[in-house]
Image (cartoon, coloured by chain):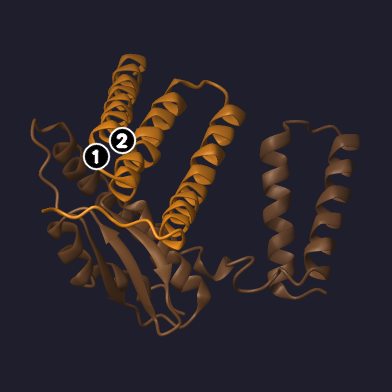
Chain colours: A brown, B orange
Amino acid sequence: MFRPRTVSLFIFLSIIWLLLSGHYNPLMLFFGFISVLMTTFIAVRMDLVDKEGHPVHLTWKIPIYWVWLLFQIIKSNFQVSIRIIVPKINIDPEMILIPMNQKSDLNKTNYANSITLTPGTVSVRLDDNGEILVHSLDKNFADELRSGSMEKKISTLGN
Amino acid sequence: MNYILDILSWLLIIVGSYFSIVGAIGILRFPDFFTRLHAAGLTDTLGAWSILCGLILQCDSFLTIIKLILVLIFIFFTSPTGTHALARAGLASNLKPWRKQ
């Protein structure tokens, strides 16, 4: 009941309650405490407080990855917008299979979501043998993904 | 100080509007379902994010800023999930991707 991850979920929920409510008189604080306590209790009963449901172990690593991802997203946003506004559309879309060596479901989700979030590539299907089917708008985007730089960054998040 | 914040916020809102409009044009111009998803990705990512960041710079209350940041986080997590679900549904119903001739 009082594992570190459960305590951290309780602290996280309390902070979110304090930031969202804006009421700080004793009665409201008491009600908030009761709600947070009940939410934590239900989450523990539903077996949600694990590495996937509350990935608190990523707190220090994931912002670094997000900054890198943000620059990738800005770059490909400009590349896609140029392909849209030119007078004659010149694209060469294709379906490609990208190998993936990630073990945990959390990393697989991170990887597939990052691919979809970057304009120009959309992850369509994840296979059991560890491959992602990706639809890419152009050769450039497919080659960028084949080079595996994004997966290397995902691997730094641990498993 | 206020002038700098205003200029920065207008810059972000203009950039966001540019990407939202270009995304909409792309949805009309691209040839098939899968390529249109890429154009919609423009509106989902930089279009929405920079408009929200511009709005955050216009806020004067701390609690409103927190709420806008939460909106940003929710868009960040839900938009790729929705795009992936659409693409998967297209593939499952045997939609043939458009190829360059």
Q: Position of residue A78 (x, y in %)?
A: 19, 41
Task: Answer above or below: position of B40 versus B84.
Answer: above
Callout 2 touching callout 1 (CB < 8 Å): yes
Identify the secondary structure beneath mark 2: helix
Q: Name the residue under label 2.
A: B27
Q: Specify whether A22 is left or right of A89.
A: right
Q: Position of residue A9 (x, y in %)?
A: 70, 61
Q: Which residue is nearer to you in this view: A129 or A88?
A: A88
Residue B69 visible in the shown view:
yes
Q: Looking at the rendering, in which quadrant would you find the N terminus of chain A?
A: bottom right
Q: Where, by quadrant of the figure, is residue A124 drawn?
A: bottom left
Q: Mark 1 points at which residue?
A: B30
Identify the secondary structure beneath mark 1: loop
Q: Where is residue B24 in the image (x, y as percent from the top left)?
A: 32, 30
Residue A61 visible in the shown view:
no
Q: Which residue is drawn at 37% across and 42% down?
A: B45
Q: Which residue is nearer to you in this view: A53 or A7?
A: A53
Q: Specify whether B46 is left or right of A35.
A: left
